[in-house]
Image: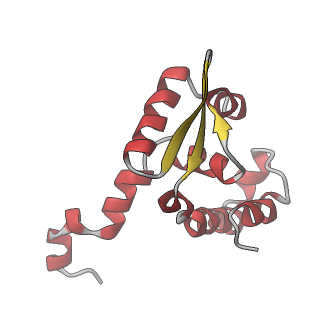
């Protein structure tokens, strides 16, 4: 049972603060993609076709401002940048794995209907450095 005092201090709750960083749409998807390696802007779009250029640009700026990713310019003409996880971003590995476990345990029908691959959790575990 949660006490009234704790509920009154909701804004200082670590869960609320963490969700301010990672709870917005696309955030964890982009972080997940980076666990599989550095990505260029176009690679995020290829992996997530329903994501627009504008939203991707905004989300990458948010992730960078929050210290979860860094951007490295690899070419100036034309400008090409790579994005990669910082140490802070890498610390989300257990969070992503816990979400994957929750999904495979509690959302079996939804996952099957979404055509997720059976080995996705094992592959994610390896990418998250949790082997």
Residue at the image position 71 percent from the left and 29 percent from the top: 46
Q: Residue furthest top?
A: 77
Q: Residue at x 60, y 62 (%)?
A: 96
Taking the image as shown, residue 13 lies to the left or right of residue 84, namely: left
61 versus 33 height, above or below: above
* Nearer to us in this view, 51 or 80: 80
Q: At which x and y percent is residue 112?
A: 79, 52
Residue at (46%, 36%) from the top-left corner? 59
The furthest residue to the right: 118
Q: Is residue 64 left or right of residue 85?
A: left
Q: In which quarter of the view is residue 44 placed?
A: top right
Can you give x and y, in whole percent of width and height, for residue 77 in the image?
A: 61, 15
Which color mode does the image show? secondary structure
Q: Residue at x 63, y 67 (%)?
A: 102
Closer-to-camera residue (91/125)? 91
Tell me residue 123's x, y (percent): 80, 60
Q: Quadrant of residue 101?
A: bottom right
């Amino acid at each position: 049972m949660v006490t009234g005092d704790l509920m009154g201090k909701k804004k200082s709750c670590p869960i609320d603060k963490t969700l301010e960083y990672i709870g917005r749409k696309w955030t964890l998807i982009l972080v997940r993609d980076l666990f599989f390696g550095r990505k260029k802007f176009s690679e995020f779009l290829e992996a997530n076709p329903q994501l627009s250029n504008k939203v991707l640009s905004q989300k990458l700026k948010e992730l960078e401002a929050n210290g979860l990713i860094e951007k490295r310019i690899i070419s100036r003409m034309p400008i090409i940048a790579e994005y990669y996880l910082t140490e802070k971003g890498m610390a989300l590995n257990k969070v992503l794995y816990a979400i994957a476990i929750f999904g495979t345990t509690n959302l079996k029908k939804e996952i099957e209907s979404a055509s997720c691959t059976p080995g996705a959790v094992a592959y994610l575990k390896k990418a998250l450095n949790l082997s």
